[in-house]
Image (cartoon, grey):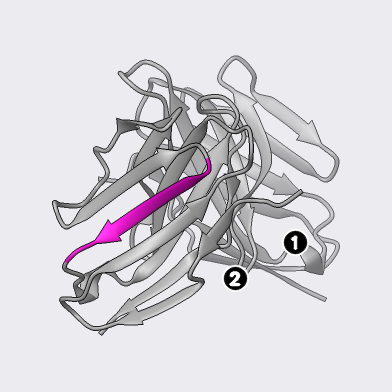
Amino acid sequence: DQQVKQNSPSLSVQEGRISILNCDYTNSMFDYFLWYKKYPAEGPTFLISISSIKDKNEDGRFTVFLNKSAKHLSLHIVPSQPGDSAVYFCAANGSGGATNKLIFGTGTLLAVQP
Amino acid sequence: DAGVIQSPRHEVTEMGQEVTLRCKPISGHDYLFWYRQTMMRGLELLIYFNNNVPIDDSGMPEDRFSAKMPNASFSTLKIQPSEPRDSAVYFCASSFGQPPETQYFGPGTRLLVL
């Protein structure tokens, strides 16, 4: 069973518009959330993160929103650029168990059209 | 600085053969992770080490999979015997500090078992 779900396998957006990538989680013990970005033939790279004590974190064109009551987070990219075309993975970390580890979603492929 | 190094980048083998994937983490990092990426399950954590000691191997699919870290600069993931369902991209990642500290991923090994 997937504890971190990205229900949209793909998303297509026009250059300059907003991209919104969504992620849902089931475990209320998760206390830290991250987004990783992956280009073809490369490993994922860290993009942005948010602690459960916050509901928003911003870094340039990238903003992550967290809604704990809904167990939902989203990544907003404004404005979208063709270079943002990649697979985006949502990940959650829980420190309440015996070990810390990141649980990743299945990823969303973003295509930004020029 | 060199990032995480993985070899081979591609591996094609026949069912029943032994496969060994190799990883060199970033120097000074004390955590090493092995992940598997598939379309259906996204990025799955297989096992991770802290200071060369396995901490959590609950993601290892079955006894056919084994991982070792004989020293701080080298780790292997072995599949014996391999099966077609093992076909996936396998990533190694390392970090300085436990999750959710930023993990740095290698380029991955694309494995195809015929």
Q: Relative to residue B14, is residue A28 depicted above or below?
A: above
Mark 2 falls on what kind of element?
loop
Q: Amino acid at mark 2?
A: Ala
Kindly indicate whether the residue at mark 2 contacts the one at mark 1 (C-beta within 8 angstroms): no
Please give the name of the residue rendered at 64% of the width and 18% of the height, measured from the top-left corner.
Answer: A54
Q: Is residue A71 in view?
A: no
Residue where numbered disc 2 is placed: A41
Chain letter behind tag 1: A
Q: Chain of mark 2?
A: A
Please identify the quarter of the rendering in which residue A50 is found: top right
Q: Residue at x 15, y 52 (%)?
A: B62
Q: Earlier in the sequence, mark 1 or mark 2?
A: 2
Residue most extreme to the front: B71
Residue A84's tag is: 1
Between residue A5 and residue B3, name the one nearer to us.
B3
Is residue B107 toward the left or the right of residue B22 in the image? right
When asked about the image quadrant of residue B114, the answer is: bottom left
Location of residue A100 in the rendering, given as x and y in whole percent from the top left corner: 41, 25
Image quadrant holding the C terminus of chain A, namely: bottom right
Residue A30 can be seen, yes or no: yes
Q: Position of residue A7 (x, y in %)?
A: 44, 55
From the viewer's perspective, is A79 left or right of A12?
Answer: right
Give the answer, above or below, for where B29 lies relative to A30.
Answer: below
Q: Is residue B79 magenta?
A: yes
**As drawn, B17 above or below B97:** below
> From the image, which quarter does the N terminus of chain A lie in?
top left
Q: Which residues are magenta?
A: B73-80
Q: Callout 1: few (<14), some (14-19), or many (20+) C-alpha neighbours within 10 Å? A: some
Q: What secondary structure do most residues of the magenta stretch adopt?
A: strand
How far apart are labels 1 and 2 at the CA level? 15 Å
Camera-nearest residue between B97 and A90: B97
